[in-house]
Amino acid sequence: MKKNFRIWAVLFWLLVWQLGSMAIGSEILLVSPLRVIQTLADMIRQMIFWRSVCFSFIRVFGGFLLGTALGCLLAVLSSRFQVVRELLSPLVLTVRTVPVASFIILALIWFSSKNLSVLISFLMVLPILYTGVLTGIRERDRELLEMARVFHVRPWRKLLMIDIPEVYPYFHSACRTALGLSWKSGIAAEVIGMPKGSIGEHLQQAKVYLDTPTLFAWTVVIVLISLLCERLVLHGMDQGMKMLRRWKG
């Protein structure tokens, strides 16, 4: 499902934001968008800004990749072996229902805060990819599978011609959801754990010192990075599928 943002709609809400800030008259309570843009412009000229962005990006995206890889692997195993599916069912349900804050606090007891966002992003992504890919495997076209069995299609050709195209829509949807959640949960972990040099540390410091312009500016950065990451990953996946379809053709 494509995002259809209209410029006029964005400008409308920016205007509402500006008017609301002017009406309240306090930057601590609600800073204006113009002030946020000015603060962001000052931030991006500092090397510490880019170091913090890289610090958080590597860990959050790393957690996403680990959760995606293990989620897909476990989904394949669960589709083949019922005992694996039954064994993982309580674990997946637990990870999906336990609040993120509980995982963060527990993780801080066991591990250092430096790589906390990797673990939390991984835990949030894993059940989404596992469930999505497992559903896709179960929903494959039975007639195509039967045809592949009757004509003794080689496993690797069956994988490329049937399995991947059939499962891809579910995988794509799961990745879209997981990417956004990985950033939300990963940054939340940094805010609580405050690893040195992270985006979460800057957010926490801005809150402590009531630096609302900086708080909003970092929030804008998180949103932009999350959207850019989503666009690049999903675009790369779509291009890969187009190449596979052309190869099939």
Image: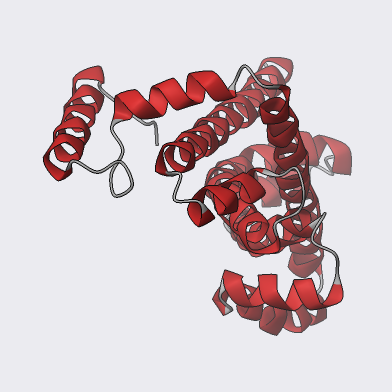
The location of residue 49, given as percent across then percent down, is: 66, 29
Instruction: Identify the residue at horizontal 16%, vertical 40% (top origin).
Output: 20
Observer-nearest residue: 193 or 235? 193
How many numbered circles does the render carry?
0
Visible residue check, residue 129: no
Instruction: Identify the residue at horizontal 85%, vertical 64% (top origin).
Output: 112
Observer-nearest residue: 155 or 90? 90
The location of residue 117, given as percent across then percent down, is: 72, 55
The image's colouring method is: secondary structure
Q: Quadrant of residue 101?
A: bottom right
Q: Compared to 145, does 77 lie above or below? A: below
Observer-nearest residue: 194 or 146? 194
81 relative to 237 in the view: left or right:
right
Q: Quadrant of the C terminus?
A: top right
Q: Quadrant of the N terminus?
A: top left
Observer-nearest residue: 59 or 51? 51
Visible residue check, residue 237: yes
Instruction: Identify the residue at horizontal 53%, vertical 32% (top origin).
Output: 221
